Amino acid sequence: MRTGSKFEHAARCIALASVAALCVFGAAAGAGVEERWYVVRMMGEQAGWMKSVEETTPEGDVRIASEMRLRIARGAIVVRLVVLTESVESAAGELRTMRSEQQLGAAPLVTTWRFTGEGVEVVDEQGGRRTARFEPTPEGDWLAPGAAARAAREQMEAGAEEISVTTLDPSQGLRAVTSTRRLRGQGPVEAMGKVVPASEWVVTIDSFPGVESVEFLDASGELVRGTTDMGGIVVEMLASDRAVATADVPAPELLASTLVTPDRPIRGARGVRTGAYVLRLRQGEMPDLPETGVQRVERLDGRSARVVVDLTSPRLAAGADADDAAYLGSSRMIDATDPKIVELAREAVKPVAGEPAHVRAERMRRFVYAYIDAKSLDVGFATASETARTRQGDCTEHGVLLAALLRAEGIPSRVVSGVLYVDEFIGREGVFGFHMWTQALLDTGDGPRWVDLDATLDDRTPTDATHIAMAVSAMAADDEFNTMASLAPLLGGLEIVVERVE
């Protein structure tokens, strides 16, 4: 088994959660500023930069844009992550368009939203492929980014000690995001060698439950310094100038800090059929962990939970799962209608055409394992369509490609984020590392069950009971990165006690 393809998910979760959170901070704090630069640090080391821009277009509209570029090391491999966002709204705050460009794989994934009186036209583009769909306008009371920034500033100038705004952020699609700031104090703050008077605010964003940030704003309401502690992985954004922000510095290594050494090793992990574990956070509150076909969860207290994984007695899926169209639908990450995906699915099941779904699903799992022949850590998070063409990636690419093939064959699927035990990885022995795999909704005779399928494992092992699920997702439109948010409090601060394995 290639352990090198297992744990990039942790570093990617840190980066994407940071991107989305800091983009929200920057949009709210950067209003009225023509151009501002920020250094982004992870665990005290410079990992990249962010730039925010606000301008008035010749048509009189307000354009707000941000650009974030990060470099993260996974052992000897350096991965570059790029996120660009843009929104255009009228002077009165009517949102006209949004655009997001995310380069997490070989080709950028570009999504454009155009708001009309009837709804939202959404166009996804990647590697020459273009797909379009029409979505309803998000419900509720939300503001365009510029209008939200103005509303926040007005509340701040009026002396409010708690400020909440709800807006759309292009990095998170059509999901309205509410950020809340609570004033904690006043005092000087240092950023990049400068000390300025500032107000200190505690910030929460509803799309990242359990994650708190601290913002220091200067007298004009501009962000001087922002810090987010994601369960022990500390991310900072500091106001700077262009030269300092874009300086060429070594990429920080984050992967090792997310590995979890349990209280005792697990012998023969790939053959484990049942396992009981206690998961505990060193700080913060343990998020709700999912129950799946083979996983049961018992919350012990605010910071800990017992997880039992039992492959020998899987439970039936919830009745609503079988009727959930998201598990068969297509999105920018999992496009089951892509002709290349359809072609690969047919190739995978050709030897077992007409056989039961569980036989075809296992055939597809083995096919993906062999098809991705470049098991590489230098891919951030490629779409299924890109992976189908490059045949390159690690656990995330295996997971989404298998999910897409299953849907192309009419089998509901979803991806799972969690941890997996391995004997050795990047010089560490006996560790759990963050991982992604796939679940298929299969009826084996007495009803549908979610069945775990790990396409990074060889022909002998569809899964094992050292897979601990922490989040599940259909990867539906505009939701693929929100799912990762629930992992943020676990990164760098997780402890695992092995109670029993058999």
Image (tube, rainbow, N blue to C red):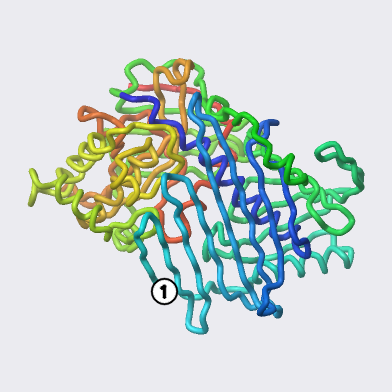
Residue ID for mark 1 = 134
Q: Position of residue 12 (x, y in %)?
A: 51, 40
Where, by quadrant of the figure, is residue 247 drawn? top right
Viewed as shown, does residue 369 lie left or right of 51?
left
Q: Quadrant of the C terminus?
A: top left
Where, by quadrant of the figure, is residue 220 drawn? bottom right
Residue 37's place in the image compared with 190, above or below, is below
Q: Residue at x 14, y 47 (%)?
A: 347
Q: Position of residue 122 (x, y in %)?
A: 45, 69
Q: Depth check: 38 or 330 in front? A: 38
Q: Depth check: 337 or 124 in front? A: 124
Residue 356's place in the image compared with 164, above or below, is above
Viewed as shown, does residue 72 lie left or right of 450?
right
Q: Is residue 439 visible?
A: no
Q: Residue at x 37, y 22 (%)?
A: 501
Q: Residues within 10 Å of mark 1 (few under 14, many from 20)?
A: few
Q: Position of residue 30 (x, y in %)?
A: 75, 59
Where, by quadrant of the figure, is residue 141 drawn? bottom right
Q: Residue at x 71, y 78 (%)?
A: 91
Q: Quadrant of the N terminus?
A: top left
Residue 160's place in the image compared with 302, above or below, is below
Q: Position of residue 265 (x, y in %)?
A: 43, 16
Viewed as shown, does residue 20 lie left or right of 337?
right
Q: Residue at x 34, y 49 (%)?
A: 384
Count every numbered label the image shows and give the total.
1
Q: Residue furthest bottom?
A: 117
Q: Secondary structure at mark 1?
A: strand
Q: Depth check: 385 or 451 in front? A: 385
Amino acid on which the number 1 mark rests in the picture: Phe
